[in-house]
Image (spheres, rainbow, N blue to C red):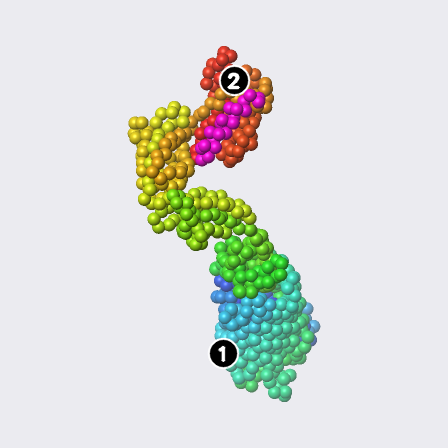
Amino acid sequence: MKKLGFIIGAIFICSYLSAVPAPTGVSGLNKVLSASPEHMGRLYFIWGGKASQNRSTDSIALKSICKFPVADTSYSAQKGNCVMVDIPFALGFSITNCLEVNISSAFLADAMEDTVTGIANALGSGCVSYGFSDVDLGVKFTPTQLPQLFPTDLAKKFNVGIYPLLSFPTGAKKTAIPELCGQDTVFGYPCRKNDGGVHRFFTNDGVSYGGKLLISGVLVAEPALIAHLNFGYMHYPYGDSKLSYGVGVEGQYQFFSPFIELYGEQRMLPAADKERLDDGGIYVTPGLRFETLANSWITIAVDFKVSGYDESGWNFSNNLPDNASRYELNGFGATPPWRANLIFSHGFNYMKPPAPISTGTLAGKVMDKEDEKGIKAVISFPTFDTTITTNEDGSYAITFTAGKTIVSASPIEKGKYKSSEEQTVLITAGEKQILNFRLERKPVEKPAIITGKITDRVSRMLCVANISFPETQVSPLVSDTSGIYRVEISAGTYVLKAEKSGYIPWTQPVTCKAGETTILNIELSPAAQMATIAGKVLDYASRAGIGNAKISFPTTQLPDVITDATTGTYKAQIPAGTYTVKIEADKYVPEGVVIVCEPNATLLKDFELFKKEEKIVLHGINFKVNSAEIKPESYPMLNDAAELLKKHPDVRVEISGHASAEGNASRNLTLSQLRAESVRNYLVTAGISADKLTARGYGITQPIADNGTEPGRQQNRRIEFRILSQ
């Protein structure tokens, strides 16, 4: 018995190494297995206990080597309590989502109590046998988990598997039960011990093979209600076979799973041998599985016999296997009335299973909002950095991973329809969602019209010329034979260029508005006629000449003109015509002006440039006391300032308000800001573009004279222009 205790203790200690969720080492209930897959890379270990009991009133003849109150050592005993105990253990490993392997065995113990008739407290009664069972090796293959063969949606709800099984003879062969007591001790009591079982056989005494067909399906999705169906066959080494069948239903909740199964086995025998040799039976098993920790379960189940053969007799002289009777049948080992099961299972993930990819489909159509006619468009998915093009009728369909995504539609024909706004869509796994886009038509913008006549500048005769708009997509055109041209164009500002062989090219900026007609007559100068331009480039403030300033003629092939390094003067001969001239110098704001050069004439033209960040004090700008209201006598000075800015339309100006040190500094800062804004508003009213003007008050922070004297304070109360940039 010390050996028995050591073996049982070793099993309990090793049980904490790893575990499986079902007694056989693969997923399932108690005897009914599941076709559904386990997580790839998960190792399971299972151990537990199974016990059953029965009672017999049969009498047997025994001999005892123990001391009894009577002299005769031969006596009649009555069989009492009969017990079977199993301690199963198994390993299972899920190689892939569709392939699992397992190996299982058990430590078995049989015991039977003998009660000696008429003798109280008899010693040496009873029978015992214990040892290991055969080892089973199984493989579960679930082909419905192969995405190449079956849809993923089907495999989530229905699975079919096969479970081939081999059983190897590792248990001890059954030996005769001694008639003499005292062969072994159990819990300190002498008893009769044999090998290979009392009520059953611990081994098949040879390799057995067979398998099962497994079917599982989801009946209810939430909470999950799953049904399992099994059909099995086993062939034993003595030539006979056994059929098995089972059906079970389990409910899966967060931490526990109740289940019930009906399981039966039937040996394939002739009718005459059924009662003598058949050890089959049918059991119904209710059970409950708890998840105590992550990947750890406890299963409690009780098998109740529905049908099967009961013990009717026990003859120790013929209970050994032979060619005629391989199994101990018609006994407790055939179909015990009940069996209690307590199973402990543990799982270990040695490979992180790939996250299931759940996808959904988004489909729909892009159409005209008014008549719902299909529009070919580009559908954009910024979340996935993906775009698709619809069919000609505007329809589309795309499959994505379930989740939120942003989507929008843009028409292929850009000028006719507006793009849609971005929308956030929730794609649901396994579902098809419809999302239609209805695009608004863009309002039809009336074109701007530019027209005029083209004449020879000298003879005043109408002539035919080529009209173009450089650096735009507008197609060139030719005036008609009478010299009249007309072009329809989008609203905006363009440079119009007229060219004719023998004439100097003519360029002119033109601004046109939608729905309006702009008349622009063109005079071309014969190429042989030249003109002279001369003058100075001056600093606006000091009136000094600016040396090395550059004068250029954009959109022409004319060379640049550089002013004299000392005096800032320039002189050049160019073909007669109208030009846009650009004047540039280091540390100065560039200027652009239009000049007209007459044939055989000299155009005297001085150009003024502002220094960058140059400050110009506007004297004589007066306001009412403690107010931002401009006095009327200041209007002439402001009108002059407006004219100056009109002459230099490319210049941006900061209007700076300054105050003397009298009064509260915070109040002076606010007042200076308001006065600067008053000047800005006046200039805007006078025709200066608002985006060329900014207003800022500096208060008393930038004095230019002594605030201790009244003349100094008057100088400090001022409005300045600060030249910003072009």
Mark drawn on residue 555: none
Which residue is identified by label 2?
660
- Residue 407 in the image, given as x and y percentages of width and height: 55, 55
Query: Label 1 belongs to which residue?
Result: 206
Which quarter of the picture shows residue 67? bottom right
* Mark 1 neighbour density, 10 Å: few (under 14) some (14–19) many (20 or more): some
Q: Residues under labels 1 and 2: Cα distance?
A: 117 Å
Q: What span is in magenta?
A: 631-653
Q: Quadrant of the C terminus?
A: top left
271 in relation to 18, above or below = below
Callout 2 environment at 10 Å: few (<14), some (14 to 19), or many (20+)?
many
Residue 176's x, y, as percent? Answer: 55, 77
Question: Farthest left residue?
Answer: 565
Magenta span has 360?
no
**Most common SS among magenta residues:** helix
Instruction: Say which residue appears at 33% left-offset and 42% top-offset.
Output: 529
Q: Amino acid at mark 2?
A: Ser
